[in-house]
Image (spheres, rainbow, N blue to C red):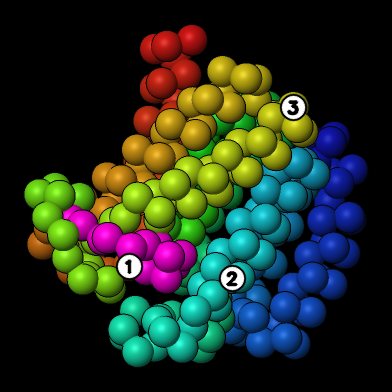
Amino acid sequence: MHGVLKLLPYALTVNLILGTLAYWKKLISVSGYIIGLIIGIVIFAYGGVGAYVILCTFFALGLWFSRVGYDEKVALGTHQEGFGKRSGRNAFANCVVGFTASLAIGLGVRINPANIIFASAFATALADTTSNELGQIYGKRPFMPITFKKTTVGTEGAISIEGTLLGIASAIIIAGEAFIFKMIDWQGFVSVIIGATLGNYIESVISVTPVRKIGGDLLNLINTVIGATLALLIYRLLF
């Protein structure tokens, strides 16, 4: 807890500045500002600088990718409302697993597994956002994840080779940051990438079943839970 108290003033200051700036720039809604502050402060104070860098990377890249080809996405009806503006519900769904893991890190509860869960949750979330947002722009031959039959761009649950590879690249970025900040070892690095990739694919499979009716935010939450669980299992079983 001593480390948490030491980082807390910095966490409060940095998040207030960045959160207010993001709200002023209309990148987040009021609920996104409030929930984002809570998530950001806790992740910085409990998870450390490395964890906070991962959170910021997830937010920045996710927002950027949501805006790439936005007019084309509007035409397809697959765009995020408000030019990709993040809400509190969106922040909670994508960050709650990492938020919980950061608490465990700060409290010293089995730090290594907690770090893998943290990194893989955000790697999975960013891989999903990347493959969805960029896949529909750069994916040339979208297909269904179960039958592998070709389909049209914008079809619910459809994936593409290009989108999948871009999603893997995003997972590598998050895993790489966790490795650089010594949150995980090389075995954890590999486990996070594999877990995130599998979690992203499973989310696509779920999206073509009746379960998709639960809504995108809840699917995102399930996605991060699956990715984090698989990454931890891979780490435990293979390494």
Up the image or down, 123 lies above or below 140; here it is above
Checking the image for residue 35, the label placed there is none
Q: Quadrant of residue 22?
A: bottom right
Q: CA distance from mark 1 to mark 2?
A: 16 Å
Extent of the magenta region = 133-144
Which residue is rendered at x = 40% and y = 81% of the image? 73
Q: CA distance from mark 3 to mark 2?
A: 26 Å
Looking at the picture, how far across and down is residue 79, in whole percent? 40, 81
Q: Residues within 10 Å of mark 2 (few under 14, many from 20)?
A: many
Verify CB contact (< 8 Å) between mark 1 and mark 2.
no
Give SS at disc 3: loop
Looking at the picture, how far across and down is residue 215, in whole percent? 27, 69
Q: Left of 200 or right of it: where is 167?
A: right
Q: Residue furthest front?
A: 140
Looking at the picture, how far across and down is residue 18, in whole percent? 79, 70
> Label 2: which residue?
63
> Label 1: which residue?
216
Magenta residue check for 234? no
> Label 3: which residue?
182
